[in-house]
Image (cartoon, rainbow, N blue to C red):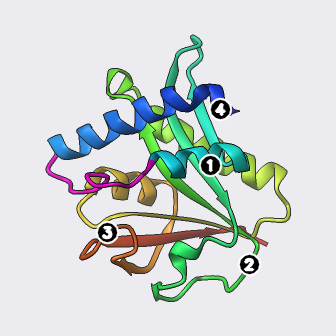
Amino acid sequence: MEIRQATINDYDQIMTILKDGANQLAERGVDQWQGEYPSPDQIKEDIEKGFAYLAVSADGETVGAISIVEAPDHSYDQLHGKWLLDTDKYVVIHRVAIHSKHAGHGYATKLLTEVIDYIRDNREDIDSIRIDTHENNAAMQHLIDKMNFTKVGELHGVYRPNEISYVYENIREK
C-alpha cells in the first residue's frame, strides 16, 4: 500500500470516501459522522495544511483516506483523562475511511500500519501518536487496539453535542 499526500484535485474523491464511510457507520448503527463533521471546510483545510492523504492499493486503486494532523490539536483540549506522555511532539490520526467497495481486504490495518511505521521511521521529532473514535464504533476500536494504542480518556461533545469519543495514544519507545 502506498500513502500519498492529497492535493486540492483530490478533494472530491476524499469527500466521496468520507461520505461512503459515514454511510457504512450508519448501516452499523454508529452515530459517528452523521452530522456536519467532517465538513467540506475541514477537508479543504486538511488538504491546504498538508494533513490529508490517500491510501492506494498495490494495483493502483485509491481505497481510502486519512488525515495526519500536526500538533497542537485543540479537539483534545477538553480530554477527560490523562496522556501517557505529556508532550507537544505528537501527531493525530483523524478521518480514517476505507471505501466500502474495498472493504474486507485488510486495508484499514495496512493503512494504519503504514502510517505508524512511517512516523516511527521518519519522524524522530514525534514522541506520540494520538487517535480517537466514537464510543459505539467497535470496528475502529478493535483496529486501534490491534495497533497497540492505549485508551487514555474520553472527549465529551467535541464533535457534536452529547457525543462521546474514546481517546487513545501510542508512544515512541525510547
Marks 3/2: CA distance? 25 Å
Query: Label 4 near label 2: C-beta < 8 Å?
Result: no
- Looking at the rendered structure, the kind of residue marked 4 is Ile
> Is 40 left or right of 169, judged from the image as shown?
left
| Circle 2 or circle 4, nearest the eye | 4
Is 75 covered by the magenta stretch?
A: no
The Cα atoms of the two marked residues, 1 and 4, are separated by 10 Å
Q: What is the magenta range?
A: 28-39
Element type where label 3 sits in the image = loop
Amino acid on which disc 1 is placed: Asp
Question: Would you name the residue on which mark 2 appears?
Answer: 88
Alpha carbons under labels 3 and 1: distance apart: 19 Å
Q: Is residue 6 above or below residue 148?
A: above
Q: Secondary structure at mark 2?
A: loop
Residue 46: mark: 1
Residue shown at the point (70%, 69%) measured from the top left: 71
Residue 101, how many percent across, how many down? 33, 20
**Separation of marks 1 and 2 at Cα, in angstroms:** 19 Å
Instruction: For the residues labelled 1 and 4, say whether their Cβ atoms are less than 8 Å apart.
Output: no
N-terminal of the two: label 3 or label 1? Answer: 1
Residue 121 falls left or right of residue 96 = right
* Amino acid residing under circle 2: Asp
* Mark found first going from the N terminus, 3 or 2: 2
Say which label, 1 or 2, has the lower sequence index.
1
- Res. 98 mark: none
Say above or below: 103 vs 164. Answer: above
What residue would you read off at disc 4?
Answer: 8
Which quarter of the picture shows residue 17? top left
Residue located beneath label 3 in the image: 160
